[in-house]
Image (cartoon, rainbow, N blue to C red):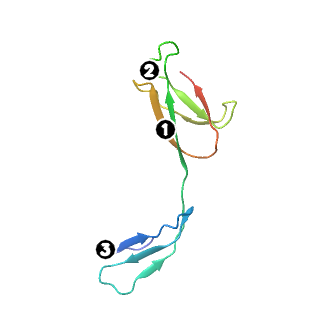
Amino acid sequence: MMGSITKDYSIYKITTGGATQDLALIFDAGVDDEKNVDFGVSWIKMVAVETVKKAQTSNAAIAEAVYELYSDAACTSLLTTMPATDSNGRYNVTLTKAQDTVYLEEIS
């Protein structure tokens, strides 16, 4: 947007239930000339990945385990390094979804 707005305006969006948002209604209290504005929004798909690290024999939580997520099975194309697991052996990360399958490798 360019310019400035010197009044308080209300903006309402109409949800279409689809992948895009396509209509907004903008008006000021007491103003008779309501304005319709068309716009488009592309929603970003997000995915949450959670790791849980536990000891094999005792099932006790293991802190400070670090994992990396890769886009390929050979684990050569790094997507992100996850922070170390907490005292409960857990950590999670939220990423923009780029594919249906990711590959997890423990690095420490």
Using a 10 Å C-alpha cutoff, classify the residue at mark 1 as few (fewer than 14 neighbours), some (14 to 19) or many (20 or more): few
Query: Of callouts 3 and 2, which one flags the residue occurring earlier in the amino acid sequence?
Result: 3
Q: Nearer the viewer, mark 3 or mark 1?
A: 1
Q: Spatial distance from mark 3 to mark 2, Cα to Cα?
A: 53 Å
Question: Furthest-right residue in view?
Answer: 74
SS type, badge 1: strand
- Comparing 50 with 39, the one in front is 50
Residue 80 location (% of width, % of height)? 55, 36
* Disc 3 residue type (three-letter): Asp
Query: Of callouts 3 and 1, which one flags the residue occurring earlier in the amino acid sequence?
Result: 3
In the rendered view, would you say 72 is above or below 14? above
Residue occupying the point 54% across, 54% down: 44
- Comparing 78 with 90, the one in front is 90
* Disc 1 residue type (three-letter): Val
Assess whether mark 2 and mark 3 are in contact (beta carbons under 8 angstroms).
no
SS type, badge 2: loop
Q: Which mark is residue 93?
A: 1
Judge from the rendering whether residue 30 lies leftward or rightward of residue 58; answer left or right. Answer: left
Q: Nearer the viewer, mark 3 or mark 2?
A: 2
Using a 10 Å C-alpha cutoff, classify the residue at mark 3 as few (fewer than 14 neighbours), some (14 to 19) or many (20 or more): few
* Disc 2 residue type (three-letter): Ala
Residue occupying the point 46% across, 79% down: 36
In the rendered view, would you say 96 is above or below 108? below
Residue occupying the point 31% across, 73% down: 8
Residue 9 location (% of width, % of height)? 34, 74
To which residue does mark 2 refer?
61
Residue occupying the point 44% across, 22% down: 63
To which residue does mark 3 refer?
8
- Comparing 84 with 101, the one in front is 101
